[in-house]
Structures are given as structure tokens and as C-alpha cells.
Amino acid sequence: MQSQVLVLKDSLKRESGSKVHHANIQASKAVADIIRTTLGPRSMLKMLLDTNGGIVVTNDGNAILLQSMIELSRTQDEEVGDGTTSVIVLAGEMLHVAEDFLNKNYHPTVICRAYNKALEDSIAVLDKIAMPIDVKDRASMLGLVKSCIGTKFTSQFGDLIADLAIDATTTVGVDLGQGLREVDIKKYIKVEKVPGGQLEDSKVLKGVMFNKDVVAPGKMRRKIVNPRIILLDSPIEYKKGENQTNAELVNEEDWGVLLKMEEEYIENLCVQILKFKPDLVITEKGLSDLACHYLSKAGVSAIRRLRKMDNNRIAKACGAVIVNRPDELQESDVGTGAGLFEVKKIGDEFFVFIVDCKEPKACTVLLRGASKDLLNEVERNLQDAMSVARNIIKNPKLVPGGGATELTVSATLKQKSSSVEGIEKWPYEAAAIAFEAIPRTLAQNCGVNVIRTMTALQGKHANGENAWIGIDGNTGAITDMKERKIWDAYNVKAQTFKTAIEAACMILRIDDIVSGIKKKQAPGAGPSKPKIETEADADGEQILPD
């Protein structure tokens, strides 16, 4: 087969080989350095200006990252919802230690092979030191979630957020059988942020709430105890034809007949619905004035144009089935699980509450707070806390936090490295040392003497024992994580290691970059288009000017 010929424009810049490796490593190190200060309870916040000039203040690793590293953080966030900062720091460190080997002309695949071996062994260490936990034990769950969100802004309201998260996730958990539980945070837990009030007023509703009012306030009841709820996915109004139809009427009476037919059609729909004696009818589509009249005459409250997600949540909460055609309604489709339907006015908006459900499989977390920014940050923290709770429910095993796990892994890998054959031994050992980045960063962020602390910790962990000794992120003291209740969920740690090492390997394998250089613009030639950065532009100098 003929070798491939690339024809490039003159204005293109092509770099390959070691130059690219160095540029990529520089870029990832720069990202890791920016992110590094957001690890641990004593973390700094970052202030980001987005393209529209809006400001985001956050220390949630996921919101900060640049392109190629962004992907890592995103995977981590979607898989387990925590450890986004650790992933970046770890991947950056793995690339940093790889730089020496590239200088010594090691081939990237050799380094990757050693890294993957280190990954397998580190997961084995995790399995060894993990300790099982009882999901039903509320106190230990609270401690766990609290330690995981202790780094976040809301740690001063620690118990509150942790409580909300545990309540919400245990509510929506579904048993799949064989001891497995599925918790779908995205679908069945809705966070409703209402500015005003105090953070302490936030609560998990045993049911759902959404921003709507009944169709005809004044005529329809706004409070119903033990309502019978019917959920529809169809419009309760006269259907217009798909295409334009013209009807030519000769007699005046025919016009009356036509109108009567429309009215009868709607009355018919309402009769079918009213047969089941509902107290509340909710539809995702429209509801005409006439239908509204028939329903309110029968004393039924109605809500129209509800979002599909909200409708699904109501169905899960009160046990109703969403019906597509009113004529297919059955008794079993009526939801009777809710204890109270009520419309309340909060601030200047009306909210519908369907609460006190018997066995809700969906819920709403109502967040109150002084300002929008505060609420957004609390919501981000709550998402993290719920992910933590979900991880523990799905895989009830714990590993020590505070850098203790990484130190144990590091010590064990250092021991094992002596038995690794051949050239892969050195990168393997380097990977072992790279794991120390996490405890080192924690120590830096606490402002303690890093070298002393690290030496003391390495001494304690030397033979892979004392697996639970780590750094207390608040004081920087070396303590036993078990006593301090500083824990991490097992699958967060496992996922962090996997994502970080796989990403490091991926970046190491890039050895060719082709990038287009824009021609310099003549002065006064009008605004140029904003340049969108891609991975290819991730040169060190682009991110951090000297």
C-alpha cells in the first residue's frame, strides 16, 4: 500500500514527535495547576467569566476545566458525580512524571503499558482496604456524605445539605432485585430553587412541586386532600386538521351544527374523564375554555401544558399512569397515592404542591436562599451530595479520604515495582509516586509544611500498613481517617484512578499536531471573529502567558 501523502496549506503549522508531547504535557500541567487549588476543604474559589460576560464563582472542578481535560472531568461527573478535581490533578501529575521518560526517549506505549499495570494494581489495593457499610445506618451515611461535600461552599450548612441528599436519594431508589438498587437522580429528583427565605427552610418534599397554577383560579379548588389524580398526554380541546380544510356551508343551520359538533366532542372527552371522579386533571397539552368550564362545574381542578419530565415525576410520586387518550382511561390509571394537592404562592409566583405521597418514587428538593448565586452554588453542591449518596447505595463500600487511599496505593505500588520486569519498571514506579499528588495538594491547600507532612505520611504508610492515616483537610494535621470520619465512596476513587490514567495515556499517544495559523489582520479592518480554542491549540503559552 502506498504511503499516505498529506497536502497542507502554506499557512498550516505542523509539529510532531517530542515537541508535541512536551506541548501537551505543558498544557495539561497548566490546567492541573489551575485546578489544584480547588481540592480539599480549604480550597480556593475560582471566578470565571463566561462568553456572555456572566460570572460563575465556583470550586466545583467540573465547571473550571479546559478542553481535553474537560472531557475527563465530565466523564467523572456523569459516572459518579464527585472527584472531578482529583481526576485533573492526578492526570496532570501522571503526565508530569512521564516527561522525564520522554526525554530519555522512552516510547509512549511503554509508558502507557506501565501505567495500565499500575492502574490494575491500584484497583486491587482499593479492593483490599475498602470497608463495607450498612446503607440503612443513617448516621454513618450522613458522615459520609458530609465528608464528601465538606470541601464545598455549603460545608457550613453541612448537615442540611447531606440530609436533603440522603432523603432524596433514598426516596427515589428502586430495587432491581439481587441486592441491586438503581437511583436515577436526573429523572426523578427535581431541584426547585426559589429565592427568598433562608437556607434552613429548604426541604425534601414527599412528592413534587412545579411552577404552575390551576387553569381557572377562583372557580377551581386550590387545596384538595387525598386527591384522585388523572394525568393526560393529550389535548382536551377540539383538534384542528393537519392541513387547511375549507368547508363551504350553504345553510345557516349547518354552521350551528358544526359548532355543536365541536362542543359535543369536547363534552364527550370531559365526560370520559369525569366518569372516574377525579379531583385533579393534569395534561401536558392544551385545555380549551369549554373543557375548563365542564371540569370546573364538576368541581375538578385542572392544570395544563405541564412539562413531560414533571408529568413523569407526578406519575411516579402518586402512582398514576399517564394516559394518551381519554377514552382509554381505566380505574388503575388514577393516582391515589398523594395526600394533599395545594397551590401556594411563594414570592410572586404560584407553585403547585402534590405532597404527602404514600410511597413516592420521585421527589422535589425545595431550595430557599437569599440570592440566585447562592442557590446555584447550593444546587451544585446538592447534586454532588446526591451523587455520593447514590454511589454508596449502589456500591456500599468505603475507602479512606484525606489522601490516605492514594498514599496506601503509592506505597504498595512502590513495593511491587521491584518485581516488575524490564524497562517498564521505571514508569511503573513513577506512576506510584504520581499518586502522592493528591495528599501533597491537600497539604499545600492547608498551608502546612508540605515536605515534613509528606515525609511523615510516607513513613507511616511505608509498608502499605496504616491504610487509614491521612491529612485532615481543615487543619492539615496527620490523623486517622476512621476517627475523623473522612471517607470516600469506593467507586468514586476507582473511577478517578481509571479516568486519570486512561486520559494520561491518551494524551501521551498524541504525537502529531497540525494547526492553521490565522493571517495577522490589518489594523482597523473591523472586529475579527472570536477564535474558538480546540485541543489542537492547547499549547502552554496559549493558556498561561509568561
Image (tube, rainbow, N blue to C red):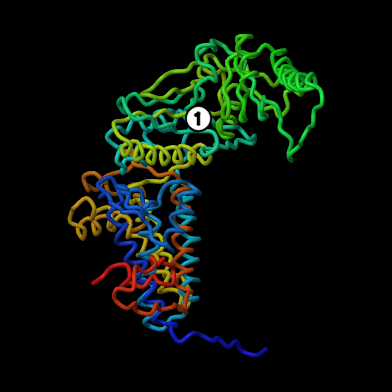
Whether residue 411 is visible, yes or no, is no
Residue at left 76%, top 37%?
Answer: 245
Q: Please give left or right for residue 275 compared with residue 474 in the image.
A: right
Q: Please give left or right for residue 253 compared with residue 214 in the image.
A: right
Q: Position of residue 486 (x, y in %)?
A: 34, 41
Q: Position of residue 136 (x, y in %)?
A: 48, 28
Badge 1 is on which residue?
170
Q: Residues within 10 Å of mark 1 (few under 14, many from 20)?
A: some
Tell me the quadrant of the picture where the N terminus can be found: bottom right
Look at the numbered disc 1 and give the secondary structure of its residue.
helix
Tell me the quadrant of the picture where the C terminus can be found: bottom left
Instruction: Answer above or below: position of 429 versus 320.
Output: below
Instruction: Answer above or below: position of 2 versus 31.
Output: below
Query: As shown in the figure, which amino acid type bears the numbered disc 1?
Result: Thr
Instruction: Answer above or below: position of 248 versus 46.
Output: above
Residue at left 60%, top 9%?
Answer: 299
Instruction: Answer above or below: position of 296 versus 437.
Output: above
